Amino acid sequence: MPVYFLEPIDLNHRDWEASIYKGPCTIRTDDPDRARQIAKHAFWITTDSPQKMVPWNNSSQVKVSLLTDHNYEEDGQEEILEPPGYNENWREIEFAP
């Protein structure tokens, strides 16, 4: 399974207030859109403003790259490889097709 690297672009944007984690992350999954969905659900937190959107799905806020030179195992289930400790945040969520 491919491994994707997600990198925040503008941490000063107000939407980052809707994310508990604001650093780069590495996710093993089938495609870049799925990587964004996993990050969105893993790092989402509520805010006091409905105008703030979780930034992980926004290409102007997060750059996604396919990692080809890495030390991660490509066999296995979908997983947040880095940072550790966030996999349980998203595993039970049903994603829309």
Image (cartoon, helix red, strand yellow):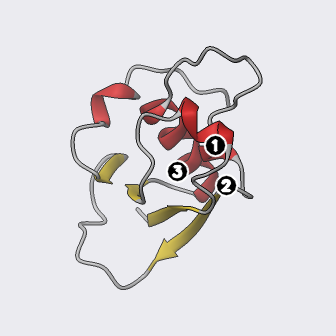
**Residue tagged 2:** 61
- Tell me the SS state at disc 2: loop
In the displayed structure image, the side of residue 96 where residue 22 appears, left or right:
left
- Tell me the SS state at disc 1: helix
Residue beneath the point at 40% across and 57% down: 25
**Residue 24 image label:** none
| Cα distance between the residues tagged 3 and 1 | 13 Å
- Tell me the SS state at disc 3: helix
Q: Earlier in the sequence, mark 3 or mark 1?
A: 3
Relative height, residue 93 to residue 38 (above, below): above
User: Dot 2 surroundings within 10 Å: few (below 14), some, or many (20 or more)?
Assistant: some
User: Dot 1 surroundings within 10 Å: few (below 14), some, or many (20 or more)?
Assistant: many
Amino acid at circle 3: Ala
Q: Earlier in the sequence, mark 2 or mark 1?
A: 1
Relative height, residue 36 to residue 31 (above, below): above
**Residue tagged 3:** 35
> Which residue lies most toward the bottom here?
69
User: Which of the pair 57/45 is nearer the observer?
Assistant: 45
Q: Are marks 2 and 1 in contact (CB under 8 Å)?
A: yes
User: Which of the pair 14/9 is nearer the observer?
Assistant: 14
Foreground tag (3 vs 1): 1
**Residue tagged 1:** 55
Residue 32 in the image: x percent, y percent? 59, 58
